[in-house]
Image: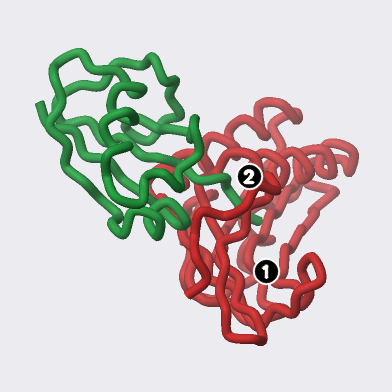
């Protein structure tokens, strides 16, 4: 299945991209997706447990992702 | 503009957002403005660039408006957050609250800004007088972003 990973702000700068389409086995978790992105150049600059959103809602590392889901890594927010 | 929660690229109009929460029953109308500060943690700032995960930021802002109204006695609440490049003193966020009485209005206004800062996926990159730029990390850890 294919999952779109979105990166923003400092995380997008670290990996040099703002969006990556990732091929993952069915029933993968957010944590497994994170483990896969670790092989991407620059990913060593991501924190061990970044905040994650699935389909625009905050999610946990054990949340299951599905084909076509939009997964986002959320850097520390700084609005206001 | 009619939405009570919005991300905007044009300068925020404080009078327009006040009108969104004004009605004959609201004896208290409160406006909070957040503006770009010239000095942050000892560094001289020339401007700030705001970026967002726009679809999610919109959803979170709408959720916060609904929660504030539910929590604070059906207060009328509107919030606007600016995106893009802002100069020092420009307004980055505006929160307007209307209620029959001031206590609920002050409480709702405070709730909205604290929740916004805690959970809405918006980021800011400060531009400094020496030409460097850095993503701000309010959690205090070193930013993953290199100065550009």
Chain letter tied to green: A
Nearest the eye: B8 or A62: A62
- Indicate the colour of chain B: red
Report whether B74 appears left or right of B131: right
Residue drawn at point x = 58 percent, y = 39 percent: B119
Q: Give the quadrant of residue B18.
A: bottom right
Nearest the eye: B52 or B59: B52
Q: Quadrant of the C terminus of chain A?
A: bottom right
Q: Residues within 10 Å of mark 1 (few under 14, many from 20)?
A: some
Q: Which chain's residue wears label 1?
A: B
Disc 1 target residue:
B14
Residue A22 percent coordinates (x, y): 17, 36
The answer to whether residue B58 is seen in the rendering is: no
Q: State the mark number for residue B116.
A: 2
> Are discs 2 and 1 both within one chain?
yes
Residue A44 percent coordinates (x, y): 41, 44
Residue drawn at point x = 74 percent, y = 47 percent: B98
Residue B143 percent coordinates (x, y): 57, 55
Residue drawn at point x = 41 percent, y = 50 percent: B53
Report whether B63 appears left or right of A26: right
Comes first in the chain, label 2 or label 1: 1
The answer to whether residue B148 is seen in the rendering is: yes
Q: Residues within 10 Å of mark 2 (few under 14, many from 20)?
A: many
């Amino acid at each position: 299945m294919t999952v779109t990973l979105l990166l923003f702000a400092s995380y997008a700068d670290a990996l040099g991209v703002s969006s990556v389409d990732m091929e993952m086995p069915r029933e993968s978790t957010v944590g497994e997706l994170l483990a896969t992105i670790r092989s991407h150049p620059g990913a060593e600059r991501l924190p061990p447990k970044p905040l994650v959103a699935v389909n625009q809602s905050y999610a946990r590392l054990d949340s299951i992702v599905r084909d076509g889901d939009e997964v986002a890594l959320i850097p520390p927010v700084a609005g206001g | 503009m009619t939405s009570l929660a919005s991300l905007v690229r044009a300068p925020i109009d404080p009078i327009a957002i006040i009108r969104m929460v004004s009605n004959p029953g609201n004896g208290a109308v409160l406006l909070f403005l957040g503006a770009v500060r010239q000095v942050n943690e000892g560094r001289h700032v020339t401007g700030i660039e705001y970026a967002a995960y726009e679809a999610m930021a919109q959803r979170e802002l709408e959720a916060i408006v609904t929660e504030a109204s539910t929590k604070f006695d059906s207060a009328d609440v509107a919030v606007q957050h600016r995106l893009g490049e802002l100069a020092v003193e420009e307004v980055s966020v505006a929160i307007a609250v209307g209620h029959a009485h001031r206590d609920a209005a002050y409480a709702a206004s405070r709730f909205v800004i604290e929740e916004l800062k805690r959970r809405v996926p918006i980021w800011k990159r400060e531009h400094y007088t020496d030409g460097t730029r850095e993503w701000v990390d309010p959690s205090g850890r070193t930013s993953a972003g290199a100065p550009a």
